[in-house]
C-alpha cells in the first residue's frame, strides 16, 4: 500500500501565500510513486491552486464539505462544487465535530456525498481527553468508524482513508500530550481488526493514518508502527522545511 502524507492547513494562509507555498513545495518534491502527498488549503484557495498544481507530485483535499449538492445553505460549499477541484476530502475532523457541531449523521452524509462526487474521503476519528481517561477509546472509535462508513458500498470502501486523531493529542505545543507510539499501535491494530470483522478482506486495502502533533522528530516513530499507512499533519505542515522533512522520513521508511 502507498503511504499518505496529508497537510491540513486549517484556516491559515491568504490565497497569495498558499500559492507561493504550493510553488515552493512543488519545486522541492520529486514525483514519488509510493507516497501520495496531499494538502488541504482553505476553500477560497482550492480553485486557483488546482490550476497551479502538478498532480504527479501533490494532490488537493478539502477540509470539509456540505453533503447537499446545491441549495439554500448560506456560507457552505458542497462536494458537488468541489468535484474536479480536489481528489480528497477530510471528513469529520475533530474541530468540525466540536466547534461546528457536525454530528455522526452529517459525517455519514458527507462521506457519501464525497464518494458520489469522485472525492476520496479521509474520515477522521478520535476520542476526547475525557473519553480517553475513562477508558472509552475503543467504543468511541468503533461508533465513529462504523457510523461514518455505514452507507458506503463494499466497492467504495477501497476509496476511503481513515485518520486516527486522538483529540487530546492535536496541536499540543508542550509535547506533554503526545500519544505514545505503543498506544497508537494498539488502537491501529484494533481499527484494522474492527474493519476486517465488519467488512472482510477489503479491510486490508483501507489506509490508516495517524494524526496529532506530528512533527519531523516524531514522524518516524509513528510511520514505523505496523499498519500505519500515513500521517495527517496540522501545524508542522505550515512550514515547508518541516513538511518536506516528514515526507522524506516517509520515503525512507518505505525504502
Ligand atoms: P496538529 O493537527 O498536527 O497541529 O496536531 C493535526 C490535525 O488537526 O489534523
Image (cartoon, rainbow, N blue to C red):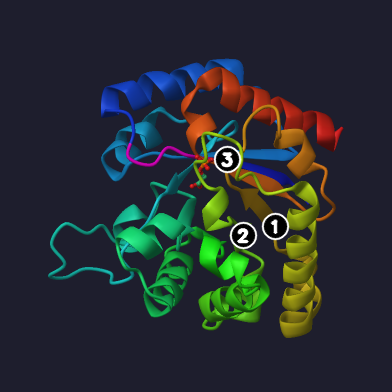
Residue count near mark 2 (Cα–Cα under 10 Å), binned few <14, some 14–19, many ≥20: many
Q: Earlier in the sequence, mark 3 or mark 2?
A: 2
Q: CA distance from mark 2 to mark 1?
A: 5 Å
Name the quarter where the C terminus is drawn: top right
Q: Where 41 falls versus 25 (above or below)?
A: below
Identify residue for label 1: 207
Question: Where in the figure is residue 175, as x and y percent of width and height?
Answer: 60, 36
Q: Earlier in the sequence, mark 2 or mark 1?
A: 2
- At a point 42% along the width and 21% down the height, the residue shown is 21
Identify residue for label 3: 213
Q: Where 227 falls versus 42 (above or below)?
A: below
Q: Earlier in the sequence, mark 3 or mark 1?
A: 1
20 lies left or right of 165:
left
Question: Where in the figure is residue 143, as x and y percent of width and height?
Answer: 57, 80
The answer to whether the beta carbon of the residue marked 3 is less than 8 Å from any atom of ligand 1 is yes
Q: CA distance from mark 3 to mark 1?
A: 19 Å
Residue count near mark 1 (Cα–Cα under 10 Å), binned few <14, some 14–19, many ≥20: many
The tag on residue 161 is 2
Nearest-to-viewer mark from 3 and 2 = 3
Mark 1: secondary structure: loop
Q: Is residue 101 magenta?
A: no
- The image quadrant of residue 251 is top right
Question: Where in the figure is residue 203, as x and y percent of width and height?
Answer: 75, 71
Q: Is residue 9 magenta?
A: yes
Please name whichever residue, 68 or 217, is drawn nearer the observer in this view of the structure.
Answer: 217
- The image quadrant of residue 31 is top right
- Chain part drawn in magenta: 7-11
Q: Are marks 3 and 1 in contact (CB under 8 Å)?
A: no
Mark 3: secondary structure: loop
Q: Are marks 3 and 2 in contact (CB under 8 Å)?
A: no
- At a point 63% along the width and 79% down the height, the residue shown is 139
Please name whichever residue, 223 or 132, is drawn nearer the observer in this view of the structure.
Answer: 132
Amino acid at each position: 500500500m502507498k503511504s499518505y502524507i496529508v497537510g491540513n492547513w486549517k484556516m491559515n494562509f491568504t490565497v497569495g501565500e498558499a500559492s507561493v507555498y504550493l510553488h515552493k513545495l512543488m519545486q522541492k518534491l520529486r514525483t514519488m510513486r509510493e507516497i501520495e502527498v496531499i494538502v488541504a488549503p482553505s476553500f477560497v484557495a482550492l480553485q486557483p491552486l488546482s490550476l497551479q498544481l502538478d498532480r504527479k507530485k501533490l494532490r488537493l483535499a478539502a477540509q470539509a464539505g456540505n453533503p447537499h449538492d446545491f441549495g439554500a445553505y448560506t456560507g457552505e460549499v458542497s462536494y458537488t462544487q468541489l468535484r474536479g477541484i480536489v481528489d480528497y476530502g477530510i471528513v469529520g475532523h475533530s474541530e468540525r465535530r466540536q466547534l461546528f457541531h457536525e454530528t455522526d449523521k452529517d459525517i455519514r452524509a458527507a462521506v457519501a456525498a464525497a464518494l458520489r462526487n469522485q472525492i476520496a474521503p479521509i474520515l477522521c476519528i478520535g476520542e476526547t481527553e475525557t473519553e480517553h481517561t475513562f477508558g472509552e477509546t475503543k467504543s468511541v472509535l468503533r461508533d465513529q468508524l462504523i457510523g461514518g462508513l455505514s452507507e458506503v458500498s463494499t466497492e467504495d470502501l477501497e476509496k476511503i482513508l481513515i485518520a486516527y486523531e486522538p483529540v487530546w493529542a492535536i496541536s499540543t505545543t508542550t509535547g506533554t500530550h503526545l500519544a505514545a507510539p505503543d498506544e497508537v499501535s494498539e488502537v491501529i491494530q484494533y481499527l484494522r481488526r474492527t474493519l476486517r470483522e465488519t467488512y472482510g478482506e477489503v479491510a486490508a486495502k483501507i489506509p490508516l493514518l495517524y494524526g496529532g502533533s506530528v512533527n519531523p522528530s516524531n514522524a518516524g516513530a509513528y510511520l514505523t508502527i505496523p499498519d500505519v499507512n500515513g500521517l495527517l499533519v496540522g501545524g508542522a505542515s505550515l512550514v515547508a522545511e518541516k513538511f518536506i522533512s516528514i515526507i522524506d522520513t516517509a520515503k525512507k521508511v518505505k525504502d
